[in-house]
């Protein structure tokens, strides 16, 4: 393998150096706009990584063993109102979302295919070079995650994915991380900004 994603999204400089040392060329563990420092690790006193200021676009990470291309998960902050506002409580909630923003991942949860399509449109409008879909394989079976518990949940997930992938196919071309890496190198490594 040449691509990698860390468990629980936990990355640091030592981890990147080890990946480069053992021949990995691509990582996709960074989650822009997400702070995992409140998530306790298995080792005593170990917490997650804060990616609040991480780049949304791919970038190179220099290590003592060579470069690693970081392809962050596609995550953006949206300030749109998505719900009808019928009362004062709803108005407060909507105002908070507009001011603070809502973090949108390009990954399914419950019934969010309209948010994924909104995110896809945001990425295309920004003229970004890629869109990364994310899903745990266990989420494709009933009870494999807290989100998709029943066979009906899984069928709704498949229907949602069919719709999202259909929309994506009109705007994007599917490629593996390794393929994306090779495309970038063929274009003289012109991605993002350095770390």
Image: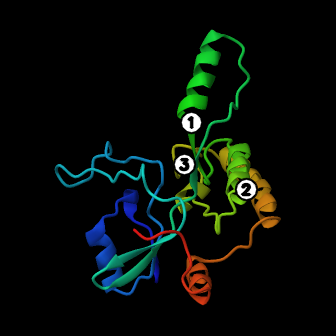
Which residue has dot 1 on it? 101
Which residue has dot 2 on it? 125
Image location of residue 40, percent across then percent down = 28, 47
Q: Residue at x 54, y 48 (%)?
A: 143
Image location of residue 55, percent across then percent down = 48, 59
Q: Is 66 placed above or below 9 here?
A: below
Which residue has dot 3 on it? 143
Instruction: Determine whether, in the image, residue 47 is placed left or right of residue 8.
Output: left
User: Around disc 2, counting alpha carbons within 10 Å, would you say few (fewer than 14), some (14 to 19), or many (20 or more)?
Assistant: few
User: Alpha carbon of mark 2 to alpha carbon of mark 3: how far?
Assistant: 36 Å
Q: Residue at x 58, y 49 (%)?
A: 76
First-in-chain label (1 vs 3):
1
Q: Is 125 placed above or below 2 here?
A: above
Q: Residue at x 29, y 78 (%)?
A: 18
Q: Camera-side residue: 72 or 8?
A: 72
- Labels 2, 1: front one: 2
User: Around disc 3, counting alpha carbons within 10 Å, would you say few (fewer than 14), some (14 to 19), or many (20 or more)?
Assistant: some
């Amino acid at each position: 393998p040449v691509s990698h994603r860390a468990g629980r999204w936990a990355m640091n400089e030592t981890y990147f150096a080890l990946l480069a040392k053992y021949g990995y060329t691509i990582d996709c563990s960074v989650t822009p706009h997400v702070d995992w420092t409140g998530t306790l690790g298995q080792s005593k006193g170990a917490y997650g990584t804060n990616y609040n200021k991480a780049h949304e676009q791919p970038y190179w990470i220099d290590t003592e063993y060579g470069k690693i291309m970081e392809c962050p998960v596609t995550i953006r902050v949206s300030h749109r109102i998505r719900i009808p506002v019928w009362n004062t409580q709803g108005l407060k909630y909507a105002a908070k979302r507009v001011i603070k923003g809502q973090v949108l991942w390009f990954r399914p949860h419950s019934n969010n295919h309209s948010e994924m399509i909104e995110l896809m449109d945001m990425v295309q409008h920004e003229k970004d070079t890629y869109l990364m879909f994310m899903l745990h394989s266990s989420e494709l079976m009933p009870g494999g995650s807290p989100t998709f518990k029943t066979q009906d949940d899984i069928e709704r997930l498949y229907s949602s994915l069919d719709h999202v992938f259909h929309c994506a196919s009109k705007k994007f071309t599917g490629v593996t991380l390794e393929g994306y890496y090779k495309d970038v190198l063929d274009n003289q490594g012109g991605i993002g900004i350095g770390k």
